[in-house]
Image (tube, rainbow, N blue to C red):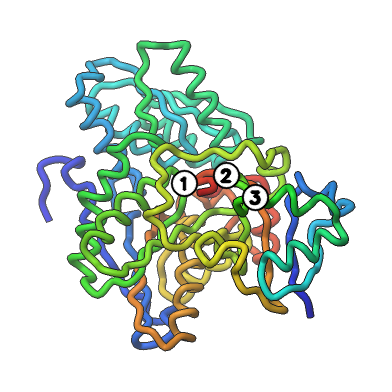
Amino acid sequence: MAIEVRIPTILRTYTGGAKSVEGAGATLAELLSDLDSRHSGLRDRLVDGSGLRRFVNVYLNDEDVRFLGGLATPVADGDTVTVLPAVAGGGR
Amino acid sequence: MRYDSLLDSVGGTPLVGLARLSPAPDVRLWAKLEDRNPTGSVKDRAAFFMIEQAEKDGLLALGTTILEPTSGNTGISLAMVARLRGYKMICVMPENTSAERRQLLAMFGAQVISSPAAGGSNEAVRVAKRLAAEHPDWVMLYQYGNEANARAHYETTGPELLADLPSITHFVAGLGTTGTLMGVGRFLREHVPGVAVVAAEPRYGELVYGLRNVDEGFVPELYDPSVLTSRFSVSSADALRRTRELLAAEGIFAGISTGCALHAALGIAAKAKAAGERADIAFIVADGGWKYLSTGAYTGTLEEAEARLEGQLWA
């Protein structure tokens, strides 16, 4: 088992068009680094020096990671992570 | 119950326990039936408060044109109040909203200007802002940034919930203008230590989001993230599934955005049960299912209904 990561259309240029990719790690930060090793540039579109970018939302099993622990949020095999552009409500 | 007029009857809606969907005796779900408002949605509260405030501010006179970007419910509520108070109503609405909403708006005498489907409600806001600039005599109440929207919930919905459920631990509502969450959330936080305020955000399919750029997110002016303690993003499939479960298990015929809120409420309930914590979770039934019958949400298999809903705005 791995962690499924769903990618929005706008970022699929980094995943060869794939709607979802798989990765591993104990935290969201580790997961994103793992993904970047195969999908170079993806991490930079999601994260800047201070954490998740303002207009990017990341959800762990449908729950916004900003309210869980941000990049330090623990993740585990079988979880689903969804990346979305911020829409109504926006990022923090 | 007797009222002097229809507008006096806004609010005061029932809070009903969901015995079958609640996962444990001390982890309970409660539904606030906002479809019991005059035009059948929670938006009657905000519409009434926004027009009252605009009247107090001297912005409205007999025959004034009110302009509003809306996916439907707010427009219907405003059109009803405008009709009773003698104002004209123009709604800017995404073209991919249900036929019933357009029929209801026409019935109340409102004019509808369609905005492109791509971009959804955000595009309707852009079009309305442009029209407002071109027509300085029109009054845009602008639900996304109007403090009277959130205040309606701070002064009515919040106190009603606390009176009916003093043991409330979680409040869940859909995230659109953010008015319900900001108003109820602020009120409950002032009165219930440790209360959780949870947003349930609709996650639409690629037809609505496909053309969007990550850097173009729209944040309503009312939104203050410090009021929230958690936020869920709910797919159309999960919202539909929960809408049907609510009807099958509890007999409540609700609109699809209610399934979205219920999905988040059930997620919280499962976490509370796993942690062995007591929970009284109240969520908003924003409207009934009537306006969504033409979307096919309630007929056939879940997969068929989901396919039919692809590209439509349901909240």
The type of residue carrying mark 2 is Val
Relative to residue B211, is residue B172 drawn left or right?
left
**Alpha-carbon span between mark 2 and mark 1:** 9 Å
Q: Is residue B233 above or below residue B144?
A: below
The type of residue carrying mark 3 is Gly
Q: Contact, CB < 8 Å: mark 2 with mark 1?
A: no
Q: Of helix, strand and loop, which one carries label 1?
A: loop
| Foreground pick, A35 / B93 | A35
Residue at the image position 35 percent from the left and 83 percent from the top: B278
Residue under pointer 3: A49
> In x, y percent, where is residue B8?
16, 43
- Subunit of label 1: B
Q: Contact, CB < 8 Å: mark 1 with mark 3?
A: no
Residue under pointer 2: A87
Residue under pointer 1: B176
Can residue B239 be seen? no
**Alpha-carbon span between mark 2 and mark 3:** 23 Å
Labels 1 and 3 positioned on one and the same chain: no
Relative to residue B266, is residue B307 drawn left or right?
right
Q: Which of label 2 and label 3 is nearer to you?
A: 3
How would you rate the neighbour count of disc 1 (Cα within 10 Å): few for under 14, some for 14-19, many for 20 or more? many
> In x, y percent, where is residue B76?
38, 37
Q: Of helix, strand and loop, which one carries label 3?
A: loop
**Alpha-carbon span between mark 1 and mark 3:** 29 Å
User: Mark 3 or mark 2, which is nearer the start of the sequence?
Assistant: 3
